[in-house]
Image (cartoon, grey):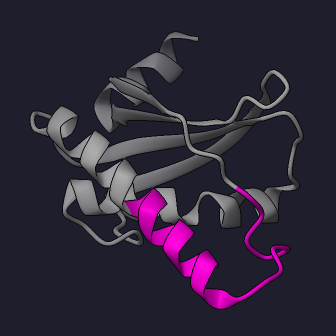
């Protein structure tokens, strides 16, 4: 299992207003940061894998906005794994938890499927 926490502030992209250029820059930055932070740690990790993306923020989003807010992070993890984000060997799980005021982060946990299955059976 590999766990990474990055100080990234994610926003609901479907509700974000403004010009497209800052949104595109934000998405590219998030994708690049996640890929660069994740790639060196997953060298020994094989596929299939379960990836849990958890948004940490003072306020919660509903489930469809949560997925939109974490889209660039998902793409970054897929880049690091060397696959497309719709590869069937990668199972995506989304979550969120409340952080302190003005505390934002994204937690990324990658678990090989064999280990994830063993953990579920142990419960």
Furthest residue to the left?
44
Where residue 119 appears, as percent x and y from the top left, is: 46, 17
Q: Looking at the figure, which quarter contains the N terminus?
A: top left
Where residue 46 appears, as percent x and y from the top left, is: 16, 42
Q: Is the residue 53 above or below the residue 31 in the image? A: above
Tell me which residue sits at (73%, 37%) in the image.
96
Q: Is residue 20 left or right of residue 120?
A: right
Pick the front one: 19 or 69: 19
Q: Is residue 73 left or right of residue 82?
A: right
Tell me which residue sits at (59%, 11%) in the image.
123
Q: Is the residue 36 above or below the residue 67 in the image? A: above
Q: Is residue 95 left or right of residue 52?
A: right
For the record, the magenta segment spans: 11-31
Tell me which residue sits at (15%, 38%) in the image.
40
Does residue 16 show up magenta in the picture?
A: yes
Furthest residue to the bottom?
20
């Amino acid at each position: 299992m590999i766990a990474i926490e990055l100080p990234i502030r994610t926003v609901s992209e479907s509700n974000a207003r403004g010009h497209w250029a800052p949104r595109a820059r934000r998405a590219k930055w998030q994708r690049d940061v996640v890929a660069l932070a994740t790639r060196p740690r997953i060298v020994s990790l094989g596929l299939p894998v379960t990836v849990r993306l958890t948004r940490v923020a003072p306020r919660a989003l509903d489930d469809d906005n949560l997925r939109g807010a974490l889209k660039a992070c998902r793409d970054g993890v897929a880049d690091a794994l060397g696959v497309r984000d719709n590869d069937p060997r990668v199972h995506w799980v989304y979550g969120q938890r409340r952080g302190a005021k003005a505390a934002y982060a994204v937690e990324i946990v990658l678990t090989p499927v064999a280990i994830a299955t063993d953990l579920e059976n142990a419960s």
